[in-house]
Amino acid sequence: MENWVYATLPTLLKVIISVFVIFTIIIIITRISGLRTFAKMSSFDFASTIAIGSILASVVMNTNQSLLKGGLALAVIIIFQTIFAYSVRKSKSVKKVFTNKPLILMMNGEILYDNLEKSNVGEENLIAKLREANVIHFNEVLAVILESTGDMSVLHSSEKSELQDKLLLGVSGIPSNSKYLQR
Protein backbone atom coordinates (compact mmCIF):
# COMPACT_ATOMS: atom_id res chain seq x y z
CA MET A 1 0.00 0.00 0.00
CA GLU A 2 1.23 3.50 -0.91
CA ASN A 3 0.62 6.69 0.98
CA TRP A 4 2.29 10.06 1.16
CA VAL A 5 5.14 8.68 3.27
CA TYR A 6 5.76 5.27 1.71
CA ALA A 7 5.95 3.98 -1.87
CA THR A 8 6.89 0.59 -3.26
CA LEU A 9 10.30 0.09 -4.86
CA PRO A 10 8.84 -0.44 -8.38
CA THR A 11 6.91 2.85 -8.05
CA LEU A 12 10.03 4.72 -6.91
CA LEU A 13 12.04 3.25 -9.81
CA LYS A 14 9.31 4.29 -12.27
CA VAL A 15 9.47 7.86 -10.91
CA ILE A 16 13.27 7.97 -11.27
CA ILE A 17 13.21 6.53 -14.79
CA SER A 18 10.32 8.82 -15.77
CA VAL A 19 12.25 11.91 -14.64
CA PHE A 20 15.26 10.95 -16.77
CA VAL A 21 13.17 10.05 -19.82
CA ILE A 22 10.81 13.03 -19.71
CA PHE A 23 13.65 15.51 -19.11
CA THR A 24 15.53 13.98 -22.02
CA ILE A 25 12.44 14.41 -24.20
CA ILE A 26 12.11 18.06 -23.09
CA ILE A 27 15.76 18.74 -23.90
CA ILE A 28 15.51 17.08 -27.32
CA ILE A 29 12.33 18.95 -28.23
CA THR A 30 13.80 22.24 -27.02
CA ARG A 31 17.01 21.71 -29.00
CA ILE A 32 14.98 20.94 -32.13
CA SER A 33 12.69 23.95 -31.70
CA GLY A 34 15.60 26.35 -31.18
CA LEU A 35 16.73 28.93 -28.71
CA ARG A 36 13.43 30.81 -28.75
CA THR A 37 12.20 28.58 -25.93
CA PHE A 38 14.99 29.99 -23.75
CA ALA A 39 14.31 33.63 -24.59
CA LYS A 40 12.50 36.10 -22.36
CA MET A 41 8.99 34.89 -21.85
CA SER A 42 5.85 36.44 -23.22
CA SER A 43 2.52 35.61 -21.62
CA PHE A 44 2.09 32.79 -24.14
CA ASP A 45 5.55 31.41 -23.31
CA PHE A 46 4.70 31.57 -19.63
CA ALA A 47 1.50 29.59 -20.22
CA SER A 48 3.47 27.04 -22.25
CA THR A 49 6.01 26.69 -19.45
CA ILE A 50 3.25 26.07 -16.92
CA ALA A 51 1.70 23.44 -19.22
CA ILE A 52 5.06 21.73 -19.72
CA GLY A 53 5.65 21.68 -15.96
CA SER A 54 2.20 20.23 -15.38
CA ILE A 55 2.77 17.47 -17.93
CA LEU A 56 6.18 16.73 -16.47
CA ALA A 57 4.73 16.43 -12.98
CA SER A 58 1.83 14.27 -14.18
CA VAL A 59 4.08 11.83 -16.02
CA VAL A 60 6.61 11.60 -13.20
CA MET A 61 4.19 11.37 -10.28
CA ASN A 62 1.26 9.46 -11.77
CA THR A 63 2.07 5.80 -12.26
CA ASN A 64 -0.87 5.48 -14.69
CA GLN A 65 0.60 7.95 -17.21
CA SER A 66 2.68 6.63 -20.11
CA LEU A 67 5.94 8.20 -21.17
CA LEU A 68 4.78 8.14 -24.79
CA LYS A 69 1.65 10.13 -23.93
CA GLY A 70 3.68 12.66 -21.91
CA GLY A 71 6.31 12.99 -24.63
CA LEU A 72 3.63 13.53 -27.27
CA ALA A 73 1.92 16.17 -25.12
CA LEU A 74 5.23 18.01 -24.68
CA ALA A 75 5.95 17.85 -28.41
CA VAL A 76 2.48 19.21 -29.25
CA ILE A 77 2.93 22.14 -26.83
CA ILE A 78 6.30 23.04 -28.35
CA ILE A 79 4.93 22.70 -31.91
CA PHE A 80 1.95 24.90 -31.00
CA GLN A 81 4.32 27.44 -29.43
CA THR A 82 6.43 27.46 -32.61
CA ILE A 83 3.36 27.92 -34.84
CA PHE A 84 2.11 30.69 -32.55
CA ALA A 85 5.50 32.49 -32.67
CA TYR A 86 5.51 32.23 -36.47
CA SER A 87 1.95 33.61 -36.64
CA VAL A 88 2.88 36.55 -34.41
CA ARG A 89 5.88 37.35 -36.63
CA LYS A 90 3.91 37.09 -39.89
CA SER A 91 0.50 38.55 -38.97
CA LYS A 92 0.06 42.07 -37.64
CA SER A 93 -3.46 41.32 -36.38
CA VAL A 94 -2.31 38.23 -34.43
CA LYS A 95 0.59 40.24 -33.01
CA LYS A 96 -1.73 43.06 -31.97
CA VAL A 97 -4.16 40.72 -30.18
CA PHE A 98 -1.65 38.44 -28.44
CA THR A 99 1.38 40.57 -27.60
CA ASN A 100 2.02 43.66 -25.51
CA LYS A 101 3.34 46.76 -27.20
CA PRO A 102 6.50 48.28 -25.69
CA LEU A 103 5.71 51.34 -23.54
CA ILE A 104 8.00 54.27 -22.79
CA LEU A 105 8.33 54.97 -19.05
CA MET A 106 10.95 57.70 -19.04
CA MET A 107 12.16 60.07 -21.73
CA ASN A 108 14.89 62.71 -21.79
CA GLY A 109 15.42 62.49 -18.03
CA GLU A 110 11.72 62.80 -17.14
CA ILE A 111 9.59 60.06 -15.62
CA LEU A 112 6.30 59.60 -17.48
CA TYR A 113 4.01 58.96 -14.51
CA ASP A 114 0.90 58.33 -16.63
CA ASN A 115 2.71 55.48 -18.42
CA LEU A 116 4.00 54.10 -15.10
CA GLU A 117 0.40 53.95 -13.92
CA LYS A 118 -0.83 52.34 -17.18
CA SER A 119 1.81 49.63 -16.90
CA ASN A 120 1.43 49.15 -13.14
CA VAL A 121 5.16 49.78 -12.62
CA GLY A 122 6.16 51.60 -9.46
CA GLU A 123 8.58 54.49 -9.46
CA GLU A 124 10.78 52.48 -7.09
CA ASN A 125 11.04 49.66 -9.67
CA LEU A 126 11.97 52.15 -12.37
CA ILE A 127 14.65 53.75 -10.21
CA ALA A 128 16.01 50.31 -9.25
CA LYS A 129 16.35 49.53 -12.97
CA LEU A 130 18.19 52.83 -13.50
CA ARG A 131 20.63 51.93 -10.72
CA GLU A 132 21.10 48.49 -12.26
CA ALA A 133 22.02 50.21 -15.55
CA ASN A 134 24.57 52.41 -13.70
CA VAL A 135 22.66 55.64 -14.31
CA ILE A 136 23.95 58.28 -11.89
CA HIS A 137 21.77 61.20 -12.97
CA PHE A 138 18.31 61.39 -14.54
CA ASN A 139 19.56 63.73 -17.28
CA GLU A 140 21.70 60.83 -18.63
CA VAL A 141 18.53 58.87 -19.44
CA LEU A 142 17.40 59.15 -23.03
CA ALA A 143 14.61 56.58 -22.63
CA VAL A 144 13.40 53.72 -20.47
CA ILE A 145 11.14 51.29 -22.30
CA LEU A 146 8.99 48.56 -20.78
CA GLU A 147 9.44 45.85 -23.39
CA SER A 148 6.74 43.38 -24.46
CA THR A 149 8.52 40.69 -22.39
CA GLY A 150 8.22 42.75 -19.18
CA ASP A 151 11.89 43.75 -19.16
CA MET A 152 12.91 47.38 -18.92
CA SER A 153 15.46 48.70 -21.40
CA VAL A 154 17.45 51.69 -20.17
CA LEU A 155 18.95 53.79 -22.95
CA HIS A 156 21.38 56.27 -21.47
CA SER A 157 24.56 58.17 -22.19
CA SER A 158 26.79 60.44 -20.12
CA GLU A 159 27.52 62.41 -23.28
CA LYS A 160 24.97 64.77 -24.76
CA SER A 161 23.73 62.51 -27.54
CA GLU A 162 20.41 61.98 -29.24
CA LEU A 163 18.38 58.82 -29.45
CA GLN A 164 18.15 57.28 -32.90
CA ASP A 165 14.51 57.39 -34.08
CA LYS A 166 14.46 53.73 -35.10
CA LEU A 167 15.12 52.61 -31.50
CA LEU A 168 11.61 53.79 -30.64
CA LEU A 169 9.95 51.89 -33.49
CA GLY A 170 6.71 50.34 -32.22
CA VAL A 171 6.95 51.95 -28.77
CA SER A 172 3.73 53.44 -27.41
CA GLY A 173 3.16 56.21 -24.89
CA ILE A 174 5.60 58.68 -26.41
CA PRO A 175 4.61 62.18 -25.25
CA SER A 176 2.77 64.24 -27.88
CA ASN A 177 5.31 67.05 -27.60
CA SER A 178 8.19 64.72 -28.45
CA LYS A 179 10.04 64.90 -31.75
CA TYR A 180 10.06 61.08 -31.63
CA LEU A 181 6.26 60.81 -31.86
CA GLN A 182 5.36 57.99 -34.23
CA ARG A 183 3.64 59.19 -37.38
Image (cartoon, grey):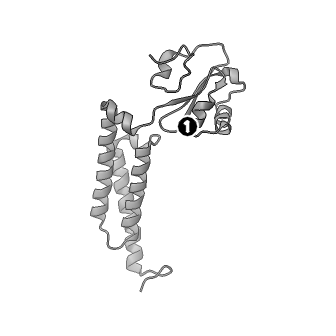
Rendering coords of residue 103 (x, y %)? 52, 30
Position of residue 145 relative to residue 82, above or below, is above
Mark 1 sits on what residue? 119
Q: Residue at x 49, y 21 (%)?
A: 167
Can you say which quadrant of the picture contains the C terminus?
Answer: top left
Position of residue 147 relative to residue 48, above or below, is above
Image quadrant assignment for residue 135: top right
Q: Is residue 90 left or right of residue 100?
A: left
Q: Residue at x 61, y 13 (%)?
A: 161
Q: Residue at x 35, y 61 (%)?
A: 21
Residue in the foreground of this view, choosing between 121 and 141: 121
Q: Residue at x 38, y 33 (%)?
A: 96
Position of residue 107 relative to residue 90, above or below, is above
Mark 1 is on which residue type?
Ser
Q: Secondary structure at mark 1?
A: helix
Rendering coords of residue 153 (x, y %)? 56, 30
Rendering coords of residue 67 (x, y %)? 30, 64
Residue in the foreground of this view, choosing between 128 and 20: 128
Q: Is residue 142 left or right of residue 180?
A: right
Rendering coords of residue 3 (x, y %)? 46, 82
Mark 1 nearby-residue class (10 Å; few <14, some 14–19, many ≥20): some
Can you say which quadrant of the picture contains the N terminus?
Answer: bottom left
Image quadrant assignment for residue 177: top right
Residue in the foreground of this view, choosing between 20 and 77: 77
The residue furthest right is 136
The residue furthest bottom is 1
